[in-house]
Structure formats: C-alpha cells, structure tokens
Amino acid sequence: MGKSRATRRGKQLPGAARAEARAEADRPPPSGCESCSPEAASFTGWAADVHPCVQDMKVQGVPLWLLGITFVLCSGHLRGLRRCPISMDMRHLQESFQDIQRAIQANDTFQNITILSALDSLQGIKPLDVCCVTRSLLAFYMDRVFKDHQEPDPHILRRISSIANSFLYMQKTVQQCQVQGRCHCREEATNVTQIIHNNYNQLEARVAAVKSLGELNVFLAWISENYQDGSAA
C-alpha cells in the first residue's frame, strides 16, 4: 500500500513541475511593461537604469540584440551632441584684431566683394555642426589666409602671429574632439565652408588674404557666440 502511494506521488511530480512552469509563464510582467514578454521586460528594467533613450522604446517582439544595437547607436549620437570645450580668451583675440583691423581694411582694394561678411548661412549653423565649421574655418585661416598674406609692418605682423598662435591652440583642441567622435561634418557644414573657399578663390591670393583678414571679426564674433564660457557646440 505504501509502495503504491509512493509510486503515485512519483508520477505526480512531473505534472506538478509542468503546472508550475505554466504558471510562471502566465505570470504578468513587471509594472511599466505590461505588453512586454518576460524576457523583454527584464531588459526594459535594465535599460531604464542606463539611458533615457532606451526607455521610450517599445520592446514588444523586438530581439534583445536589436535593442542592444539601438542603445549603442543612440548613445553614440548623444556623444556627438556633446559640446567640444575650447578654453580661449576671446577678449584678447578681439582686442588684438581691433588693433590692426583699420590698417588691414585700408589695404582692401575690393570693398564691394566679401568672403565671410555676407555669409548669412554662418549664423544659421546648427549646434551639431559648430565643431566641424570651427575646424574648417581655423584650417582656412591657418593654411590659406595667414600663409598668403605678406605683411611689411612689424606691429601688424606681431598681432597676426599672436592670433595665429591662438588659432593653432584651438585647432589642437578641436582635433582632439574629432578623434573622440564629437566633431562630425554633415553636408550643411561642408557647404558653408565650401562657399567661403569659393569666394576666396575668385580673387588673387594676396588680395583674398587681405580681405579675409579684414573680415576676421566675423569669425571671431561667431566663435564668441558659440563658445561662450569655454564651451562649444
């Protein structure tokens, strides 16, 4: 009799295990993810602690590997939106230029032509493109304008050299941001800098250099606007 009951109990165990498994499967997911599968719900709980970008995602029926890839891409995009910090004494830069601005502009023989001054699109640069445009314009002045300009006045030359040294420092900082993936160049930013180069190419190199130096206040004002308090977009 005892042996028969033990046998029946042994046969009942697999059925009980299956019933418990079914109950576990039918158990509703945690709050905040009522429509998720238990597997996806557990991922949502983890993602909620990691990044708000993933919190808004609907994970029903989405494989975990796809959510993981989306999270990585989302994080990378947000890193690209971080500002590229540039610590620079803009007041000193502007004072250095103002000291020589009138003398340089007096040598500009084509007053009816502009390279930067009429570039309204420079003011419409989006925060995501600021780093790229900054890098391109710094290279424009360092690689073209300062090299093409021939200045006989020692005082003006010293001021230009001081500005060039400051630009070189900013170049190194922006290059570090580029290495870190925070200085992407989109089509809008590329188009703006290409317009500046096209305007420059329409003039003889020395003439274009003088005009670009005379319009340096446009670039300095734009830098001050986008890099206030040592920050950058």
Image (tube, rainbow, N blue to C red):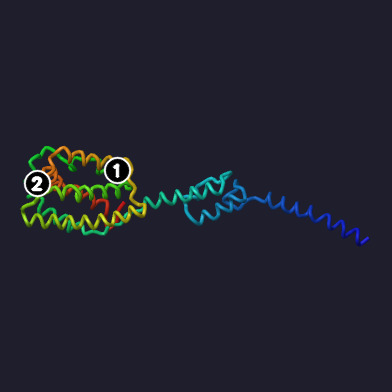
Which circle marks residue 189 in the picture?
1
Residue visible at 56% across and 49% down in the picture: 64
Q: Nearer the viewer, residue 81 or 148?
A: 148
Q: Would you call the spot at circle 2 few (<14 residues within 10 Å), some (14-19), or many (20 or more)?
A: some
Quadrant the N terminus occupies = bottom right
User: Which quadrant holds residue 123?
Assistant: top left
Residue that mark 2 sits on = 105
> N-terminal of the two: label 1 or label 2?
2
Mark 1, other Cα within 10 Å: few <14 / some 14–19 / many ≥20: many
| Percent position of residue 156, x then y | 9, 54
**Could you say whether the residue bearing mark 2 is in a helix, strand or loop?**
helix
Rounded to the nearest angstrom, the CA distance separating label 1 from label 2 is 28 Å
Residue 4 rendering spot, x and y as whole percentages: 91, 58
Q: Left of 71 or right of it: where is 32?
A: right
Residue at the farthest right position: 1
Please give left or right for residue 71 compared with residue 163 in the image: right
User: Residue at coordinates 17% horizontally, 59% vertically from top-left?
Assistant: 92
Q: Amino acid at mark 2?
A: Gln
